[in-house]
């Protein structure tokens, strides 16, 4: 632009010759022209600012990339071995264990019989570890051939498996006697417990209160069924005579008379157990006609109603607890009928406790559910034949006396 201006001034001066000074532009005009020429080639300021903003806009809108990694849980770093394995995994190294691989474990899920076996072993170990002054030998009896080996289901839903296998049977006083027993009584009890006939009888009445092994057997339907099979296969007549003889002899001075006089609880319970053999034998050997299982086995394993178990302690002079409500079924009626018949012996423990128990059962199960009265008292002393003969003799004498008066 300046070059063109200079050329224009030159041409103008050469064209007009001497009139150059007259037509020369004033200095102010030349300055404006010069100032305009300086900025005519530069872009406007607003255009430049817009260009800068457009260039910076992509940079402002782009997200800043930060190379970050997820933090591992603190628990992972607490295990040095796991941390080392993780570092080796990241580095690409592989660890090889040159040792022999372990053998596979030969195991099978535990069955119901396995659990019963373990509980049986625990009970036997506990019984064998207890020391006593007079411990009778353990008797092994095989299930009688007359009993069924098929599994049966009790009223409580527990399956009673077959009892073909032989197993050790419980014994009375397997935990020993207390320290205040007299020497004469200890000798008598030891002799009785080791008597072969007594051991074959396996009296349940002697096991209910004083046998740790029997207590363990009560926890299993299989074990208690084995015990009942052996006890119920005994000759009740022979065993009744044996237990009655021991019950009489235990009161002598050479046996346990002083222990009974001082109230030794174990000897008192032994005497009651001997006297209660027959009613306890009959009641514990009853079977449920529907399930074909022992009523006692169903009652002793019925965890929902412990009152069913209390009935079997009535012959041992233990009253039915107040408020207890035994299950109203055929087993209850049959058991109470056995006890009612046993009350004919007015000297028995049942004669003093049966009526209250029967009334409590009737309150729970309904009026007249069981008979709440004692059986007719048994006649003691002379036999019925002798009584009849004496009555006939009295009648004949009376006739002769009347005849003599008439004559």
Image (tube, helix red, strand yellow):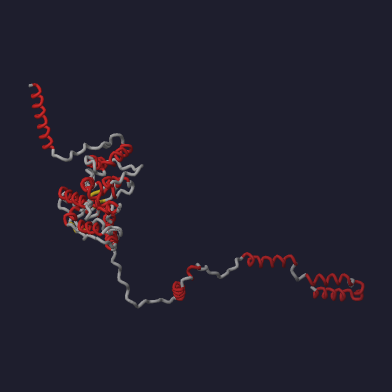
The spot of residue 183 in percent (x, y) is 25, 59
Q: Nearer the viewer, residue 50 or 366?
A: 366
Q: Quadrant of residue 373?
A: top left
Outermost residue toward the left in this view: 407
Q: Is residue 131 left or right of residue 141?
A: right
Q: Is residue 75 left or right of residue 204?
A: right
Q: Residue at x 13, y 37 (%)?
A: 384
Image quarter where the C terminus lies is top left
Q: Is residue 148 above or below residue 402?
A: below
Outermost residue toward the top in this view: 406
Q: Is residue 79 above or below residue 277?
A: below
Q: Residue at x 10, y 24 (%)?
A: 402
Q: Nearer the viewer, residue 47 or 261?
A: 261
Q: Is residue 6 above or below residue 364?
A: below
Numbered marks: total: 0
Q: Nearer the viewer, residue 205 or 70?
A: 205
Image quarter where the N terminus lies is bottom right
The spot of residue 73 in percent (x, y) is 50, 67
The spot of residue 389 in percent (x, y) is 10, 35
């Amino acid at each position: 632009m300046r070059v063109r201006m200079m050329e224009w001034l030159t041409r103008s001066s050469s064209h007009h010759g001497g009139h150059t000074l007259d037509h020369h532009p004033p200095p102010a005009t030349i300055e404006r022209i010069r100032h305009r020429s300086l900025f005519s080639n530069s872009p406007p300021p607003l255009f430049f600012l817009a260009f800068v903003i457009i260039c910076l806009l992509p940079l402002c809108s782009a997200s800043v990339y930060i190379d970050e990694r997820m933090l591992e849980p603190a628990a992972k770093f607490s295990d040095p071995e796991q941390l080392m394995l993780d570092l080796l995994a990241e580095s690409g190294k592989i660890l090889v264990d040159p040792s022999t691989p372990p053998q596979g474990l030969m195991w099978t899920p535990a069955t119901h019989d396995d659990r019963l076996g373990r509980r049986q072993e625990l009970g036997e170990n506990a019984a064998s570890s207890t020391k006593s002054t007079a411990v009778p030998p353990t008797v092994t009896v095989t299930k009688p051939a007359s009993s069924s080996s098929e599994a049966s289901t009790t009223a409580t839903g527990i399956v009673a498996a077959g009892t073909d296998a032989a197993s050790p049977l419980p014994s009375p006083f397997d935990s020993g006697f207390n320290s205040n027993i007299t020497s004469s009584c200890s000798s008598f009890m030891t002799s009785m417990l080791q008597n072969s006939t007594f051991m074959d009888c396996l009296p349940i009445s002697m096991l209910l209160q004083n046998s740790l092994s029997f207590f363990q057997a009560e926890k299993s339907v299989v074990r208690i069924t084995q015990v009942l099979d052996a006890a119920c296969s005994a000759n009740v007549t022979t065993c009744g005579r044996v237990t009655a003889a021991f019950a009489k002899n235990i009161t002598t001075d050479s046996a346990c008379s002083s222990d009974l006089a001082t109230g030794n609880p174990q000897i008192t319970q032994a005497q009651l157990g001997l006297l209660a053999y027959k009613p306890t034998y009959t009641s514990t050997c009853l079977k449920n006609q529907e399930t074909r299982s022992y009523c006692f086995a169903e009652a002793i394993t019925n965890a929902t109603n412990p009152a069913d178990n209390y009935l079997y302690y009535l012959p041992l002079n233990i009253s039915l607890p107040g408020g207890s409500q035994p299950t109203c079924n055929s087993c209850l009626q049959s058991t109470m009928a056995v006890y009612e018949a046993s009350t004919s012996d007015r000297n028995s423990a049942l004669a003093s406790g049966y009526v209250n128990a029967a009334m409590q059962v009737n309150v729970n199960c309904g009026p007249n559910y069981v008979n709440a009265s004692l059986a007719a008292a048994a006649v003691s002393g002379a036999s019925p034949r002798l009584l009849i003969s004496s009555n006939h003799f009295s009648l004949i004498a009376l006739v002769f006396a009347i005849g003599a008066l008439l004559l």
